[in-house]
Image: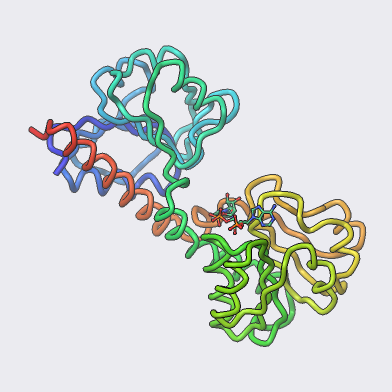
């Protein structure tokens, strides 16, 4: 249980509602800022203004999936007010307070460094990335279905990168009856892809494999679907780029050739906010519970 543990949540979207629900179930003392338009009542949760004073006794500050933007603005769906993370907020936080977010931009990293605060980025964790790959693959399928006039079953699909998202994507396509090629760079990944019944190839050969492709799902966060690759694709092909912004596709050239290419960031929060919220809530509570256990400060 988290009895006596003070947690402040600032901003966020529907995913944070799952986090609030879980924290209150565990009996944490929860203060929320940036939720003044929220109608759902959470018993025992304190709604507060986003002022530094609310952080003075916090054990954890929970920020949204993307902590802040490059100017420190915290995205907050449930308020019309602007929430900005400032020096004064972090100066007010006790030194042993954890700052927890999905992923941090340099602004948040620098501010936490400056105040010697422990910053935890949940999306960097393998377990969270693997759980998140499930709604990501489902969202990518949704986009593929919406943007093609063929079934996934029987399609010629390529998945680029066989990491945490790529594996789930390739396996999901395979389960639906697609012919799945996967682009990899390491011998052991090639062998694993072969063992799993995919058709692996090494990335330098991508252009050679592009000739008869209906769908490309990219998970590699570097320029990989280049003009040379796009030049080989049939005009019916659709590229769904899952890699973090700016993606790994030459979108300008794809448009010039008349090939559909879509950058698809943040799919878990878009297609399955409740599940995505539960993934964050599970991981976050696990981290806070572990911290409480290590300090032996559970009341
Ligand atoms: P990951 O586990 O690190 O997988 C990335 C894969 O890319 C690895 O297989 C890696 O190969 C490969 N790779 C990286 N650089 C490469 C290069 N230069 N050439 C060939 N292969 C390369 O990452 P992940 O968790 O799957 O996430 C992948 C991307 O998707 C990230 O940008 C992440 O932010 C994004 N993402 C997007 C969504 C969404 O909603 N769109 C959701 C979740 C994640 P090795 O294994 O050989 O290193």
Q: Residue at x 53, y 27 (%)?
A: 73
Q: Residue at x 52, y 22 (%)?
A: 110
Nearest the viewer among 25 and 205 is 205
Residue lying at the far front in this picture: please name it: 187
Residue lying at the far left in this picture: please name it: 299
Location of residue 291 (image quadrant): top left
Question: Where 171 falls versus 280 (above or below)?
Answer: below
Question: Where 3 falls versus 274 (above or below)?
Answer: above
Residue 136 shown left or right of residue 278 in the figure:
right
Q: Quadrant of the C terminus?
A: top left
Q: Residue at x 88, y 57 (%)?
A: 227
Residue 103 shown left or right of residue 257 in the figure:
left
Q: How is the image coloured?
A: rainbow
Q: Quadrant of the N terminus?
A: top left
Residue 104 shown left or right of residue 218 in the figure:
left
Ligand 1 falls in which quarter?
Answer: bottom right
Residue 17 coordinates in the image, percent (x, y): 35, 47
Residue 72 coordinates in the image, percent (x, y): 53, 24
Location of residue 171 (image quadrant): bottom right
Number of marks in the rendered image: 0
Q: Residue at x 60, y 65 (%)?
A: 140
Residue 44 coordinates in the image, percent (x, y): 18, 37
Residue 91 coordinates in the image, percent (x, y): 38, 13
Location of residue 34 (image quadrant): top left
Question: Where 134 falls versus 28 (above or below)?
Answer: below
């Amino acid at each position: 249980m988290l009895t006596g543990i003070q947690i402040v949540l600032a901003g966020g979207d529907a995913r944070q509602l799952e986090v609030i629900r879980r924290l209150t179930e565990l009996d944490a003392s929860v203060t929320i800022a940036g939720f003044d338009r929220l109608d759902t009542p959470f018993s025992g949760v304190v709604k507060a203004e986003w002022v530094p004073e609310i952080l003075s006794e916090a054990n954890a500050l929970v920020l949204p999936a993307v902590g802040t933007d490059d100017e420190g603005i915290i995205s907050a769906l449930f308020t019309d007010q602007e929430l900005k993370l400032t020096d004064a907020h972090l100066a007010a936080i006790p030194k042993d307070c954890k700052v927890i977010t999905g992923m941090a931009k340099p602004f948040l990293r620098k501010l936490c460094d400056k105040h010697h605060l422990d910053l935890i980025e949940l999306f960097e964790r393998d377990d969270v990335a693997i759980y998140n790959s499930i709604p990501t693959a489902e969202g990518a399928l949704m986009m593929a279905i919406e943007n093609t006039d063929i079934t996934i079953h029987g399609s010629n699909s390529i998945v680029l990168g066989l990491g945490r998202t790529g594996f789930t994507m390739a396996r999901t396509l395979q389960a639906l009856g697609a012919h799945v090629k996967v682009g990899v760079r390491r011998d052991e990944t090639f062998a694993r892809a072969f063992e799993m019944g995919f058709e692996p190839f090494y990335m330098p050969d991508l252009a050679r494999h592009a000739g008869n492709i209906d769908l490309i799902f990219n998970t590699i966060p570097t320029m990989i679907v280049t003009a040379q690759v796009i030049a080989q694709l049939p005009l019916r092909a659709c590229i769904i780029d899952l890699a973090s912004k700016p993606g790994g596709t030459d979108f300008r050239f794809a448009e010039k050739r008349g090939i559909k290419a879509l950058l698809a960031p943040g799919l878990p929060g878009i297609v399955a906010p409740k599940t995505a919220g539960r993934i964050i809530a599970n991981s976050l509570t696990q981290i806070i519970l572990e911290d409480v256990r290590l300090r032996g400060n559970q009341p």
